[in-house]
Image (cartoon, rainbow, N blue to C red):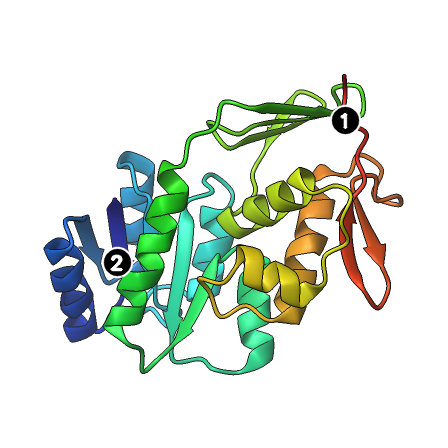
Amino acid sequence: MRVLIVEDYQKINDLLAHYLKQDGHHVVQTMKAFDALHILKHQSIDVILLDLMLPDMQGENLIKIIRDFTSVYIMVISAKIDVEGRINTIALGADDYLTKPFSVEEVMARLKNVEKRLTTSDQTIYSFNQGQLKIILESRTVMVEGHTISLTKDEYDLFIYLIKHPSRVFSRDELITLVLSHSQAYDRVIDTHIKAIRHKIDVDPSHSSYIKTHYGIGYQFVGQKDA
């Protein structure tokens, strides 16, 4: 994989780069947000390892900008440990969140899971509600009324898992275990992801046409599959 490290503490930046290179990944390093944006717009990157406290821009603002033009996987590694801050960072579009101090071995293990997901190929095409929603699994493309929308890696994986099991209602804990076991996700993060998915895919914001909430239980995909 091509991994971009955005970390302003040189020792941590170099430590991550050393392990990534040993594992066979192509590594790009920077300590500034604006340099990271330039790299992302001119190079192919699969994963970003991102610190939130950067000298030229807060990492949260950088995530917002990144999500305007790419769904690249973002793993935040930050000293910020408050729960609300972590939830807000996920809501902005981060896919995973680790707190400092961290284990390099854990980072590498999580990246292996990400790599597996990136290399999975499936030529199935799903169509729902008379073509209103289409998903091309091989390219991980999601289209609503003919327009491609951008889901983060975890949003996409959650959505596809619900689509593949339409008859089941999944609790938050089940979704964490079955889909997001690679991360430090917890129940409120699932709610944040579902809210973001609905915002992006529902044509009528006042009516959730694809994901139904079973209050006190969990979530279920209820789109009408096309013949």
| 156 to the left or right of 81 | right
The amino acid type found where label 2 is placed reads Ile
Query: Where in the figure is residue 16, as x and y percent of width and height?
Result: 20, 65
Instruction: From the viewer's side, name the closer residue of 90 and 157.
Output: 157
For discs 1 and 2, the disc positioned in front in the rendered view: 1
Residue positioned 42% across, 30% down in the render: 121
Describe residue 42's horizontal placement relative to residue 93 as left or right: left
Residue 187 location, quadrant: bottom right
Can you identify the residue that label 1 sits on? Answer: 225
Circle 1 Cα neighbour tier, 10 Å, few/some/many (<14 / 14–19 / ≥20) = some
The quarter in which the C terminus is drawn is: top right
Task: Looking at the picture, tell me which residue is in the foreground, 27 or 126.
Answer: 126
Q: Quadrant of residue 125?
A: top right
**Does dot 1 land on a helix, a strand or a loop?**
loop
- Please name the residue shown 70% across and 62% down the image: 191
The disc placed on residue 5 is: 2
Instruction: Look at the image and tell me in which quarter the N terminus lies.
Output: top left
Percent of width and height locating residue 67: 50, 46
Q: Residue at (11%, 62%) from the top-left corner? A: 18
Q: Position of residue 58 (x, y in %)?
A: 42, 67
